[in-house]
Image (cartoon, rainbow, N blue to C red):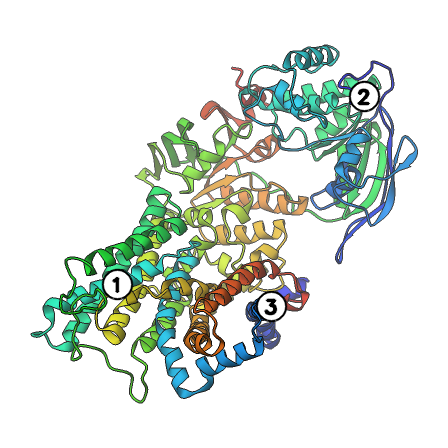
């Protein structure tokens, strides 16, 4: 395989699917979807979680075999029995999370990605070849430092560079900007747009960020519940129209009104927190924050800057190496008795990993907070399953958790319903402090609206809410004050009304 | 779908039926695994030129065919029950402890050592109580140490408990062949006997000692502990997802220590019964592999304390038939171990079958 794409114009590939259908058992994941991605276009694929975007892409990439339907490349039908076949056709994919080897340099990562790595690599020759390639591309990445030392934006550029180096001329991007700052995202998408305009590349981008779609895409295709909803030039669609296409005529929960925030007492105080990551390296450094009653403080930041370690410290999953926590001016440690006494609750991302026991029943999972209190425990350490099930049935009904019954293992529920069950468990009693981390990660619109509404309700009722989120839109929607976390430190704090996306983004990137 | 979320009393029966149907998966799959291992073992016998039908009928006769064989079976089942609990309790916390053998051996040794200075002046019941307490204390410390290493030092409990078993066996051998050897016993290096007046007799009307009753009571008590107490609930949360347990502020370290110590105490009690009801002294006969067969017991019972009782009796029966098989079929003693090993492997493979059969799923799922 030549590592040097010839500089011929219009090398971009067009790709079409016809009647793609994929059935898993009784589930129709993809139902007769036909899309047409023209050569040299930037095509956005929109849809909710579970709308079939990944299934469609996996069929194109040869990870799945479609039950019915064809893929056409440049108008000719092709067979893609496996990912290697897709690669040979020039179809490459960039994933949401990085697939680079952190301990190797950029050059090494590119060379080992080739299908025909020789047994003995002539590194000098490879470097020269690579330098020539990079000269002709707009992407600039430091090639000789280990990838672990690169910023997220640089890693994502390198992922794209890798596909171009492998001579892939049809790129599928799966939410490529989810780990980037807004500036990094704009830069990368802008460069890609330049390449599609020049006819060097075709892009199919899975996204849920309307801003990026309206700004960079030529065409938009929307899927819903596995079916094709519509396709149109991006300039003809408003954000409202796109979101209606995505969710159909479903009614979302009205956004909760924000009660005006007046001077309230401090409820949660983080005083000089330090903590290490799993490797024993400092992850959280000197984090101090005060959260008032009836206030949401949102911590923004690019993933991997110590936010998850901070949340783990607050929820008792990671020891502090230094610093103190206070609730209502009293020392607080995240252990059961104090959680109950100070009414501290939490919502975390990926609840099956962080907040639930997948194999235990819905009823049991709903009782994690209350199993050692009446009526479930009448004292002396005894436990009564009867009141546990009764309480579970109430919560299931009140929070509209869709489950076959309280005895169903919670892992059989959909992601949105698991998070709803956790919401029911954590928010159904009095809440004074609420610690929230990426609560809507991977959920559908209806669940997101519900969860954000509930968080706002708690704030309006006077809870002090600390919200850590990698989704800047979520922070801008909910927070009263915004803090930015970068390299383990809080580098910026401002009232939400007095800052903007651009300023926050600059601090997220570490430019002060 | 929405209507199933509304609690309605008329569904109670269907509800219960649904639960039975789903939990039957946990009975049917292990039984299928046993059947498969029996078929595989038959092939093994055929390869040796033996008749599998003879083998299984001999196992039936030697283990369950007569009242004598039943009593033999139950005598072997009682340490297996307690050894099974030593695996089942930590398993609820997500730990695989396979070193019950060591705690059993040391528990028996501790019981014998406690009895030696008491024999002659102390009334038998007092001696027995002290023996039982020291057996449980030593067993509890032994497996509790495994829990300590796991929680505070991050050492894999499977490896450490296995290695500690060999240390325990060496400790027993060191003392019975040295400082504590009874010089009047020329045959097998042993401690001084506790004497017939101290030994526990059989339960009335049987030749089965009280260890069986103790085991059954322990199983029921552990079931209650795990399913009807806040301790058990917290342990199950910890075992199912330790991150979730920590986020609920549960004292994970204390749960691990208490559970492993309890597990060790119960298997130590098995050692006490082996000394006080069977051997009358501590010697290498304590190293009979009950601790290791207990692993198979607990896995076959899916770590359910109540299911441990029948499973231990079943495996005790196979064990009891070993002698008969050996004499009649001219097969080595280890043949039964081959059968147990096959069962274990097939059982572990069968773990992948859970959730694959639609018949066990609830309708709404």
- Please identify, in this view, whether the residue under mark 3 or under mark 2 is nearer the observer: 3
Residue toward you, A103 or B220: A103
Q: Are marks 3 and 2 on the same chain?
A: no
Where is mark 3, residue-wise?
Answer: B43
In the rendered image, the vertical position of residue A183 relative to residue B86, given as above or below: above
Mark number, residue A196: 2
Given the image, what chain letter belongs to the residue carrying mark 1? Answer: B
| Residue A249 on image: x %, y % | 77, 48
- Side of A140 relative to B303 (left or right): right
- Left-right relation of A111 to B75: right
Taking A117 as reference, is A167 left or right?
A: right
Query: How far from the left and from the top, in percent, is residue A95?
Result: 67, 33
Q: Which of pointers 3 and 1 lies earlier in the amino acid sequence?
A: 3
Residue at 60% x, 72% y is B21
Tell me whether the residue at label 2 lies in contact with that at label 1, contact meaning CB atoms closer than 8 angstroms.
no
Relative depth, front residue between B291 and A167: B291
Q: Position of residue A246 (x, y in %)?
A: 76, 42
Return the residue found at the far bottom.
B205
Mark in front: 2 vs 1: 1
Q: Quadrant of residue A504?
A: top right
Q: Is residue A399 visible?
A: no
Marks 3 and 2, how far apart in space? 65 Å
Q: Residues within 10 Å of mark 2 (few under 14, many from 20)?
A: many
Q: Quadrant of the N terminus of chain A?
A: top right
Which residue carries the number 1 mark? B107
- Mark 3, secondary structure of its residue: helix
């Amino acid at each position: 395989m030549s590592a040097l794409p010839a500089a011929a114009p219009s090398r971009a590939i067009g790709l079409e699917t016809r009647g793609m259908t994929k059935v898993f058992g009784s589930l129709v994941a993809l139902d007769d979807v036909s899309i047409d991605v023209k050569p040299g276009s930037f095509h956005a694929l929109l849809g909710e979680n579970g709308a079939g975007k990944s299934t469609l892409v996996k069929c194109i990439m040869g990870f799945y075999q479609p039950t019915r339907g064809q893929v056409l490349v440049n108008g000719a039908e092709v067979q893609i029995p496996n990912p290697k076949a897709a690669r040979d056709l020039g179809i490459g994919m960039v994933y949401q999370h990085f697939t680079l080897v952190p301990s190797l340099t950029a050059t090494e990562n590119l060379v080992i990605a080739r299908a025909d790595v020789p047994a003995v690599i002539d590194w000098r020759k490879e470097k020269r070849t690579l330098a020539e390639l990079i000269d002709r591309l707009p992407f600039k990445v430091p090639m000789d430092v280990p990838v672990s030392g690169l910023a997220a934006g640089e890693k994502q550029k390198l992922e794209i560079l890798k596909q171009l180096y492998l001579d892939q001329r049809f790129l599928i991007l799966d939410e490529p900007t989810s780990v980037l700052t807004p500036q990094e995202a704009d830069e990368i998408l802008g460069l890609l747009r330049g390449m599609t305009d020049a006819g060097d590349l075709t892009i199919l981008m899975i996204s849920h960020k309307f801003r990026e779609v309206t700004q960079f895409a030529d065409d938009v295709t929307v899927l819903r519940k596995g079916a094709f909803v519509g396709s149109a030039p991006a300039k003809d669609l408003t954000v409202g129209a796109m979101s209606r296409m995505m969710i159909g005529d479903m009614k979302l929960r009205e956004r909760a009104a924000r009660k005006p925030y007046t001077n309230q007492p401090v409820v949660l105080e983080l005083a000089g927190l330090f903590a290490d990551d799993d490797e024993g390296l400092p992850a959280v450094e000197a984090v101090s924050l005060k959260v008032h009653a009836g206030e949401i403080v949102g911590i923004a930041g690019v993933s991997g800057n110590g936010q998850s370690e901070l949340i783990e410290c607050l929820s008792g999953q990671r020891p502090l190496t230094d610093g103190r926590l206070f609730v209502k001016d009293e020392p607080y440690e995240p252990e059961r008795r104090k959680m109950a006494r100070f009414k501290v609750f939490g919502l975390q991302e990926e609840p099956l990993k962080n907040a639930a026991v997948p194999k235990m029943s819905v009823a049991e999972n709903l009782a994690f907070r209350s199993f050692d209190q009446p009526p479930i425990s009448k004292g002396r350490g005894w436990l009564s399953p009867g009141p546990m099930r009764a309480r579970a049935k109430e919560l299931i009904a009140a929070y509209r958790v869709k489950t076959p019954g309280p005895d169903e293992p919670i892992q059989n529920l959909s992601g949105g319903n698991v998070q709803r069950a956790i919401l029911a468990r954590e928010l159904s009693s009095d809440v004074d402090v609420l610690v929230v981390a990426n609560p809507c990660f991977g959920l559908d619109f209806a669940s997101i609206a519900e969860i954000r509404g509930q968080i706002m309700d708690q704030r309006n009722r006077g809870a002090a809410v600390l919200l850590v989120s990698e989704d800047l839109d979520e922070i801008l929607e909910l927070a009263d004050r915004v803090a930015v976390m970068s390299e383990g430190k809080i580098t910026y704090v401002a009232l939400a009304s007095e800052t903007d996306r651009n300023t926050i983004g600059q601090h997220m990137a570490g430019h002060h | 779908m929405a209507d199933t979320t509304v609690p309605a009393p008329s569904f109670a029966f269907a509800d219960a039926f649904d639960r039975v149907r789903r939990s039957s998966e946990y009975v049917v799959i292990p039984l299928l695994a046993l059947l498969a291992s029996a078929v595989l073992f038959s092939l093994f016998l055929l390869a040796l030129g033996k008749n599998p039908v003879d083998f299984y009928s001999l196992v039936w006769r030697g283990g369950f065919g007569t009242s004598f064989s039943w009593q033999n079976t139950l005598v072997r089942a009682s340490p297996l029950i307690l050894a099974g609990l030593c695996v089942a309790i930590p398993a609820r916390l997500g730990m695989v402890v396979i070193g019950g053998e060591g705690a059993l051996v040391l528990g028996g040794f501790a019981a014998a050592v406690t009895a030696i200075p008491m024999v002659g002046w102390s009334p038998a019941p007092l001696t027995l109580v002290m023996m039982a307490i020291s057996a449980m204390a030593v067993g509890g410390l032994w497996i509790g140490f495994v829990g300590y290493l796991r929680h505070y030092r991050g050492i894999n409990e499977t490896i450490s408990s296995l290695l500690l078993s060999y240390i325990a066996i060496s400790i027993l051998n060191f003392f019975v062949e040295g400082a504590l050897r009874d010089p009047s016993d020329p045959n097998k290096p042993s401690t001084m006997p506790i004497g017939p007046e101290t030994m526990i007799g059989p339960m009335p009307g049987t030749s089965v000692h009280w260890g069986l009753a103790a085991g059954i009571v322990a199983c029921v008590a552990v079931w209650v502990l795990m399913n009807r107490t806040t301790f058990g609930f917290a342990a199950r949360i910890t075992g199912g997802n330790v991150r979730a347990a920590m986020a609920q502020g549960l004292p994970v370290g204390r749960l691990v220590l208490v559970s492993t110590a309890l597990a060790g105490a119960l298997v130590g009690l098995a050692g006490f019964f082996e000394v006080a009801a069977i051997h009358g002294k501590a010697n290498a006969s304590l190293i009979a592999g009950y601790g290791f067969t207990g692993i198979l017991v607990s896995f076959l019972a899916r770590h359910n304390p109540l299911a441990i009782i029948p499973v231990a009796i079943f495996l005790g029966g196979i064990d009891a038939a070993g002698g008969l098989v050996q004499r009649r079929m001219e097969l080595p003693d280890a043949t039964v171990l081959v059968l147990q090993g096959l069962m274990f492997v097939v059982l572990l493979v069968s773990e992948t079958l859970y959730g694959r059969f639609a018949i066990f799923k609830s309708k709404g799922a």
